[in-house]
Image (tube, helix red, strand yellow):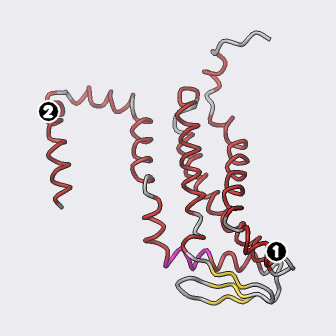
Amino acid sequence: MEGTLVAAGKLCVLAPTIILFPLATWKKIAYIYFPEAIAGLVVLFTFFPRRVLQAGWPWYGQVLGRFVHILARIFVSKLTYLADSNPTLSGPELDVTIIPDCSGLNGVELFDYLFGAVAFLDWNRFRKGRPLLVYFAGLLAMLLGNAIRITSFVALGNHGFAESVSRFHISAGWIFFSAVFLVYLSMTYRWMLDKRIIAEEPRQPS
């Protein structure tokens, strides 16, 4: 509560500007800087994804566990699902327990950093609005990729590669998420570009 009051006090210095500017001016400002405002809100609400996933883990962990179980049963017929706060997929050769560290948070954070760098470098070349759609779709893509990653561990671990999965599943995550990001960016980058701006750019002499 004290922090909220301090923040509100600091924002009070904007009150004279808000009062003195006519409504038409504010509408014009909102229209011109709408994409930047949306980008700022995205950064504000996604800067702490760890807290969001940690708070929702009791629910999200069960959804992730059930989804991985459905996928993994295609490859491991005798796979059973043990519901718990950290669900376990029990197979004939390897049991895989899905803990909060397996939530895909590392992939989401990596996507935030890499996509943010791309948006910063090429913002003036993008068609405003499309990066926002690509961003949220990308978060879903990383979470889906994480589910596929865990499924591969379950499938490989129960087909003779249990020791390799136990040894490399953590370090392999960064490689996997980086590959997912590159594939996703290659599929969406050209769609985000504003063709009119690209056409106006001077061509480099060959």
Q: What separation in Å lies between label 1 and label 2 (alpha carbons)? A: 64 Å
Residues rendered magenta in the picture: 58-64
- Viewed as shown, does residue 50 lie left or right of 61? left
| Quadrant where the C terminus is found in the figure | top right
Query: Which residue sits at x=56%, y=56%?
Result: 108
Labels 1 and 2: the sequence-earlier one = 2
> Which circle marks residue 156 in the picture?
1
The prevailing secondary structure element of the residues shown in magenta is helix
Q: Secondary structure at mark 2?
A: helix
* Residue at 39%, 49% in the rendered image: 44
Q: Give the quadrant of residue 143.
A: bottom right
Residue 161 at x, y percent in the picture: 83, 76
Mark 1 surroundings: few (<14), some (14-19) or many (≥20) residues within 10 A: many
**At numbered mark 1, what does the secondary structure look like: helix, strand or loop?**
helix
Identify which residue is drawn at 63% across, 31% down.
193
Q: Which residue is disc 2 drawn over?
A: 19
Q: Is 167 situated left or right of 44 in this image? A: right
